[in-house]
Structure formats: C-alpha cells, structure tokens
Amino acid sequence: VMIVLLLKLCLFAKCGLVNSFTTPSAVRIQQRGGKIRTTASKRVTGGGISNDSVALSMFNFGSGNSKGSVASIPKSNNERDNQAIDAIKAAIKKKPSGKSIPLIECEFPPLGALNKLGDGSLRSTLEAEDANIAFASKLVKGLAPFPFGPKINVFMSSAASNSYVTKAKTKIKGGQVLPLKGGVDEEVLSEKDICVMVTPSTRSDYQIAEKLASSGQVFAVIIVNAFAKDQKSIPSSATMGYFLKPLTYNSQIAGFLIRSYPSEWTVLDAFSKEVLGTFTDDEIRVKNTNTPDLRQSGKLVQSSVDQRAIRARQL
C-alpha cells in the first residue's frame, strides 16, 4: 500500500495534477492510525524540506493522549508499556510545536510482583534487567517505525555489566545499543537522533543525559527507570513523560499515582478506580527536581480507604 501510494503521488506530481504533497515519512506514519492526515506536516512546494518540517513528519505519531485526558490504571504490563510509549511520544511531539522538552523521564516498576524489586536476589535483579530491556525494545519500535523513523541510540549505564549490554544488543532491534563506559562519541550523534538511556545509575550517566538534552546535539533524551537517583540527578527542566507508582496502605496496594503526559499527575483509588486528586508539576514535584512528593498522594489514598471502611461498618 505504501509503495502504491508513493507511486501515485509521484505520477500526479509529474503530470502537474498536484502542486504539493506530504513527505513520504509523514504519509507512512499517518497511515499507522488508520487514516491519512496531512494537517500536522508541512507542505512541500518545490523548494527544499526544512529540518522543522522533517521533524514534524517524523514525530507525527498519531492522536495519542489528548490534553486534559485522565490517566488510568493499567490492567497489565503490556497496557502499561503502551501507555508509557504513547505518553513519551506526546512529550516528544511538544518540541516541534514551540516548547522544547528535550529531556523526558519514564519511571515505573519493571516487575509485576512488587516484592521482588527490593529483595536483593540475583534472580530478581536479572528479571528486572530483562523487563527494562523488553520495554526499551518496545519503545524503540514505537519511536522509529521502519523505515522512516529517526535514528535511536540506546545507551546502557556506565555501571552495566558486559553481559547486560550484550543482552540488550541481542534483544533491542532497530536502535544502536551503546555502553556509556568511557562517555559518548558525539560524532555518531545528529540533531535528529533520539537517545534512550536505560536505567542510568551513576552521576556521569545523568550528566551525559543533561548535557545532550541542553546542548541541542540530539532531538530528545529519554531516561527509562533511573536507578540510584537523588535530587540532583535529573533537573526540574525535565518532563516526566510517564510515571506509575503503587501507593500502599496497611501493607496493601491501595492506590496509584500516575502521570501520563499530557495529563496531570493523577491519584487513583486501586479498588474503585476513582480519581482522588490531580496535581500540576508545580504542585507535586519536590523543588528543583523532577521527582514527585508522595506525601499528599498517600494521604488521599489513606483517606479513601478509611472512608470506605467506615461506610462498610455502617451497612
């Protein structure tokens, strides 16, 4: 279908039947949504194609989340991954529209069994590594649909083992997997590239991410499940594209704090799925960081559980 469409466009242009047409990359990506839409990409009228128009067509990912949409609790890891990828795409799309958001963060529990995240066992560590690589592989495919997507550079933490890097190179297709040990060879990067950093964990990892984003050397930098992060690791200029945090009360998951860009930070009851409250970046983030303060979210969930218990006793 793609080839036939391009041949028809070329034929029409040659015959003088059309004076302008969308770039092939725009056509390819627009078709993914089931419709052909040309409003988001700049028209080509015989002159060259500007970098901005190419970027716009590259990142026309489809409708995604609409502004003001409400986050929802994912029912499975696959649904969570899809939510995260859609949110990241929405954050990337914001850049060519005028407001630059080159540094995007994505944070969620990689394993469904939450008690495995902190038990310190080798098995749990390996399972978490596999889960992060699996998500990175999905993300690369979602950001760079072959053959018209941007080049994706997947950077592994400078603290990552050789076996982990090798595993990532085997599993992640469609992107160039590079270790951060020894820094980044800036000559291999271009301003249209997207860099995905999988579980950065050292100060140098975070410094590289911030430098790449602030210098304009690449189109966007995405941090996936930052590890050993402190308040200085990621600046407040970053955007939390996707955030999923289970909130516990009485040793049970009672709610969730979710941020799925462009929606606001949303607190949901785990049982009723009711929205308990929403927050803007300024209202919830710890000052000068990209990290949310969980205290108010926890209080909302606690109050919801207590009120439900009171109602149950009154029956």
Image (cartoon, rainbow, N blue to C red):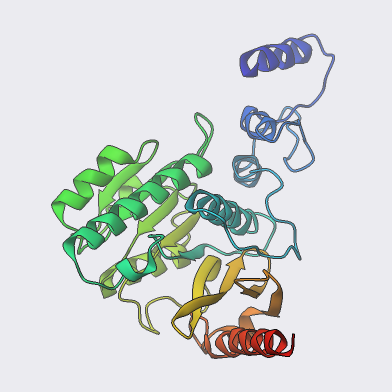
Residue 13 in view of the camera: yes
Residue 61 as seen in the image, left or right of residue 218: right
Measuring from the top left, give residue 217's x and y in whole percent.
43, 56
Q: Which residue is drawn at 67% across and 69% down?
A: 273
Reply above or below: 287 against 216.
Answer: below
The residue sitting at the left extreme is: 162
Q: Which of 132 and 143 is in front in this view?
A: 132
Q: Residue at x 73, y 27 (%)?
A: 46
Measuring from the top left, give residue 246's x and y in whole percent.
50, 73
Reply above or below: 297 against 193.
Answer: below
The quadrant of the rendering that contains the N terminus is top right
Q: Which residue is drawn at 59% across and 41% down?
A: 58
Residue 183 as seen in the image, left or right of residue 59: left
Measuring from the top left, give residue 208's x and y in whole percent.
33, 66
Residue 87 as seen in the image, left or right of residue 122: right
Q: Which of 6 and 32 is in front in this view?
A: 32
So how many labels did they put on this image?
0
Q: Which residue is drawn at 34% across and 41% down?
A: 172
Q: Nearer the viewer, residue 303 or 209?
A: 303
The quadrant of the rendering that contains the C terminus is bottom right
Question: Residue 114 occupies which quadrant of the picture?
Answer: bottom left
Question: Residue 11 occupies which quadrant of the picture?
Answer: top right
Q: Nearer the viewer, residue 158 or 63?
A: 63
